[in-house]
Image (cartoon, rainbow, N blue to C red):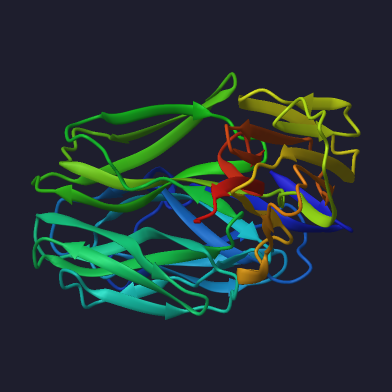
């Protein structure tokens, strides 16, 4: 996949299989192996680089330790070096991603040599709007033929991220990992997945394909107590509208479990529609027929029944008027929120509070929404007995944002 803006690329990806014994890969004592990866175009500035291990094979000997470093980076290529203090590595294949996106910060690879159970590693970052993060295990070292460990994001703030290590024994010598930090809409990740133990295919999963992003399982750790080699890999393929990925071992390798996260990272910057302005009308009307009515003016659609409804907003409509009409009863108060801006802190909504006054039993909100997207938007309208909600669904139901909500509550006498 390649994305171009004004002649420069802002995203690129590829698969590297240079570190493979059949192509002459030999990583032994006092030896390092270097390869150069060339981008399919030119970035305006050197991009951020992320490596995702796909297939790893380590020989049956101790200690087993390997590491890697990106030793140079330009707008057209980068160089990666693998170091093996002991002659253990047979294969290290990986996907790479090069990104220039202000929603994402990819920290350089981190290495830890203090690997006590429940260790917390703190790293600073400069993404002030950070809402989430994920961590990818990329290398490790061990002193004996028994490992059981994994890492996870423990805490994320606007200035730092904390990684926590779970380690059940003292055989782990070191770990190397990368952290990706993002805004709320940059990516979606699953909770930690643990494969069953065994040989060959441990876990296969099929999920709907999202055209706006890319999927990868990110290794978090594993449990292994076999005297054989460590050999594990992830593979995936597209099948009609789905992507199927497999977590497996190969060449008679026994694993107790492999732990990983399932991640979608989005290229298209999709943000929900927001209320640019709104107008309120209050009056007395003795001919009110519907307690709740929602109208989409440009689409000539209206909704009055209790239930959930989905409606598509063409991307050609850069402004959308949604009109909400409500019947007001004595002893009630109307509260709610309208989305004012996205990812802009605690002041991102208009807060609504209206009391029943002077017999005005009818209230109308005429909301002018603006949208910026190259794709049609999907709204979910939910009408209840005393509440309405309007949510925007993006990335094929993976993410939802509430853009309007109104609710009647009783006023205490």
Q: Position of residue 21 (x, y in %)?
A: 37, 47
> What residue occupies the far top of the structure in this picture?
240
Q: Position of residue 305 (x, y in %)?
A: 66, 22
Q: Tell me if residue 102 can be seen.
A: yes
Vertical placement of 399 versus 124: above or below?
above
Picture quadrant where residue 65 is located: bottom left
Locate residue 174 relative to residue 339 in the image: left or right.
Answer: left
Vertical placement of 193 versus 301: above or below?
below
Q: Residue at x 39, y 53 (%)?
A: 25
Locate residue 208 relative to residue 285 in the image: left or right.
Answer: left
Q: Nearer the viewer, residue 309 or 407?
A: 407
Q: Position of residue 346 (x, y in %)?
A: 61, 70
Q: Residue at x 57, y 63 (%)?
A: 49
Q: Residue at x 9, y 68 (%)?
A: 170
Q: Quadrant of the N terminus?
A: top right
Q: Position of residue 186 (x, y in %)?
A: 60, 55
Q: Nearer the viewer, residue 209 or 40?
A: 209
Q: Tell me if residue 39 can be seen.
A: no
Q: Residue at x 72, y 54 (%)?
A: 357
Vertical placement of 18 versus 139: above or below?
above
Count the marks: 0
């Amino acid at each position: 996949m390649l994305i171009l803006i004004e002649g420069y690329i802002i995203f690129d990806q590829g698969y590297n299989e240079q570190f493979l014994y059949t192509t002459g890969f030999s990583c032994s004592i006092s030896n390092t192996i270097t390869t150069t990866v060339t981008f399919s175009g030119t970035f305006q500035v050197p991009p951020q680089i992320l490596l995702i291990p796909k297939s790893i094979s380590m020989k049956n000997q101790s200690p087993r330790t390997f590491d890697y470093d990106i030793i140079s980076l330009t707008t057209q290529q980068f160089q990666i070096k693998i170091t093996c203090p002991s002659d253990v590595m047979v294969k290290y294949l990986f996907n790479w991603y090069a990104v220039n996106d202000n929603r994402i910060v990819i920290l350089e690879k981190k290495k830890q040599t203090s690997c006590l159970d429940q260790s917390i590693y703190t790293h600073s970052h400069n993404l002030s709007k950070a809402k989430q993060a994920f961590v990818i295990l990329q290398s490790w070292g061990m002193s004996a033929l028994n490992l059981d460990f994994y890492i996870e994001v423990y805490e994320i703030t606007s200035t730092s991220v904390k990684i926590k290590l779970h380690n059940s024994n003292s055989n782990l010598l070191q770990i190397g990992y990368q952290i990706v930090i993002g805004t709320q809409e940059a990516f979606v990740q699953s909770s930690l997945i643990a494969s069953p133990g065994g040989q060959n295919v441990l876990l296969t999963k099929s999920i709907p394909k999202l055209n706006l992003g890319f999927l990868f399982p990110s290794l978090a750790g594993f449990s292994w107590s076999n005297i054989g080699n460590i050999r594990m890999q992830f593979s995936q393929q597209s099948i009609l509208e789905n992507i199927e990925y497999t977590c497996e071992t190969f060449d008679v390798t026994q694993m107790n479990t492999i732990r990983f996260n399932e991640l979608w990272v989005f290229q298209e910057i999709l943000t929900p529609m927001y209320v640019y302005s709104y107008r309120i009308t209050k009056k007395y009307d003795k001919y009110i027929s519907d307690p709740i009515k929602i109208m989409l003016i440009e689409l000539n659609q209206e909704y009055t029944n209790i239930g959930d409804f989905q409606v598509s907003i063409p991307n050609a409509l850069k402004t959308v008027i949604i009109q909400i009409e409500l019947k007001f009863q004595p002893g009630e108060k109307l509260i709610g929120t309208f989305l004012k801006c996205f990812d802009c802190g605690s002041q991102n909504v208009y807060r609504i509070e209206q009391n029943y006054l002077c017999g005005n039993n009818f209230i109308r909100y005429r909301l002018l929404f603006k949208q910026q997207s190259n794709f049609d938007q999907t709204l979910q309208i939910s009408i209840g007995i005393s509440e309405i909600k309007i949510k925007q669904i993006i990335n094929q139901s993976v993410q939802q944002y509430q853009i309007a909500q109104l609710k009647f509550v009783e006023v205490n006498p």
